[in-house]
Image (cartoon, grey):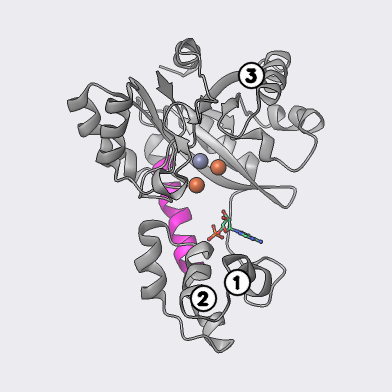
Amino acid sequence: MIDLHSHTDESDGTCSPAQLIGEAARTGIHILGMTDHDTLRGFDKALPVARANGVELICGIELSTKLHGQSVHLLGYFLNDGDHGITEFRDWVLDMQASRRDRNVRLVARLQELGFNITLEEAEARGRGLTGRPHFAQLMVEKGYVSTLQQAFDEYLDESAKGYVYRREPQFAEGVERIRKAGGIASLAHPVRVRADIETLLPELCDVGMNAMEAYHSDHSPKDTSLYLALAERHGLLVTGGSDFHGAAKPSVRLGTGYGGNLQIPQDLVDRLKEAAPK
Ligand code: AMP
Ligand code: FE
Ligand code: FE
Ligand code: ZN
C-alpha cells in the first residue's frame, strides 16, 4: 500500500515523525509521502527511522499559498534528491517560517491591544514549530474570551476581523516555481476544496508549471476522483494521492485507506512520478 499525503506533529498532525513511520510499517505501507505544512523537519527526523523500518519515505511538503485571494494548498514531492537547488528551497521554507513568526509577534501585540491577556510563549507551547492562527484561537477559547474556535476567527482572526495582521504568504505560482526549481513535482492538493470551478482554473495552474494533481484523497468521492483523473489526463498532469492523515487530530482518517476504506491509491502512480522527477 502507498500513501503520499501525511502529517506529523512537526505541523498539525499528532504522531511524531518516528511514530508515523511505525504506523506506516504496521499498516503495511511501503511507500510513504510525508507532507507537513510548510516544513521539512518531520521528514528529516523520520528518514533514518524509515530506513530502519523498510519504509520508503518520499520527501514532501504542503505549502499554503494564495491564489486569487483564496488559500490553496500545494503539494511538493521529491524535494531531497540530487542538487537541484534544494538548499535554496530549504532556505526559502525557513524564510517563510521566519515571516510566520514575525506575524505571530505582531498578532500577539494586536491581541494585547484589544485587551486579551495572551502571550507568544503560550501560543508557541500549543503550536510548537508551526504556530499559527488556529493556536491563538485555541488559547482564546481556553481563556474564555470566546466560546468556539470559529468565533475567535469570525471576531478577531479572520482576514476581515479586527485582530488580523498581515503575513507574507507565497502566491501559488511562486510555490510551484520554487518546487519545480528544486527538482520537485508540484501537485494541487485536495482539488475538491478549491472554491472555484476547477475546469476553468486548470489551464492557468498548468501555465505556471504545476505538473500534477491529487486525484486520490480521503475527501474525494469516487465521482470526484474520476473527474480529477479525467482532467489530469486531459491536461497532461501526473496524479498523486494520499489520505491526509493527521493522527488523533482527524481520527476518522486512516493512513493509506482514508475514511472507512474509501481510499484506494494505485501503486503504479508512484512509478510515474519517479520517472517524471528529474534525476
Ligand atoms: P495561519 O497560517 O497562521 O495564518 O493560519 C491559517 C489557518 O487558520 C488555516 O489553515 C485555517 O485552518 C485557519 N483559518 C483561517 N481563516 C479561518 C476562518 N475564517 N475560520 C476558521 N479557520 C480559519
Ligand atoms: Fe493540516
Ligand atoms: Fe491541505
Ligand atoms: Zn494535508
Q: Secondary structure at mark 3?
A: loop
Q: Residue at x 66, y 34 (%)?
A: 191
Q: For the residue carrying disc 3, how many other residues have a C-alpha within 10 Å: few (<14), some (14-19), or many (20+)?
A: some
Q: Residue at x 40, y 61 (%)?
A: 127
Q: Quadrant of the N terminus?
A: top left
Residue 212, position in %: x, y?
59, 24
Which residue type carries mark 2? Met
Residue placed under numbered mark 1 in the picture:
152
Q: Which mark is residue 41?
A: none
Is there CB contact under 8 Å for labels 3 and 1? no
Labels 3, 1: front one: 1
Evaluate whether residue 165 shows in this view. Answer: no
Circle nearer the N terminus (3, 1): 1
- In the rendered image, the vertical position of residue 96 relative to residue 105, given as above or below: above
Q: Which mark is residue 237?
A: 3
Labels 2, 3: front one: 2
Numbered range of the magenta stretch? 89-103
Circle nearer the N terminus (2, 3): 2
Single out the residue that lies furthest toward the front. Answer: 260
Q: Is residue 269 left or right of residue 176?
A: left
Is there CB contact under 8 Å for labels 2 and 1? yes
Q: For the residue carrying disc 2, how many other residues have a C-alpha within 10 Å: few (<14), some (14-19), or many (20+)?
A: many
Is there CB contact under 8 Å for labels 2 and 3? no
Report the Cα–Cα distance between label 2 and label 1: 7 Å
Q: Secondary structure at mark 1?
A: helix
Q: For the residue carrying disc 1, how many other residues have a C-alpha within 10 Å: few (<14), some (14-19), or many (20+)?
A: many
Residue placed under numbered mark 2 in the picture:
140
Circle nearer the N terminus (2, 1): 2
Q: Is mark 2 within 8 Å of ligand 1?
A: no
Report the Cα–Cα distance between label 2 and label 3: 43 Å
Which residue type carries mark 3? Leu
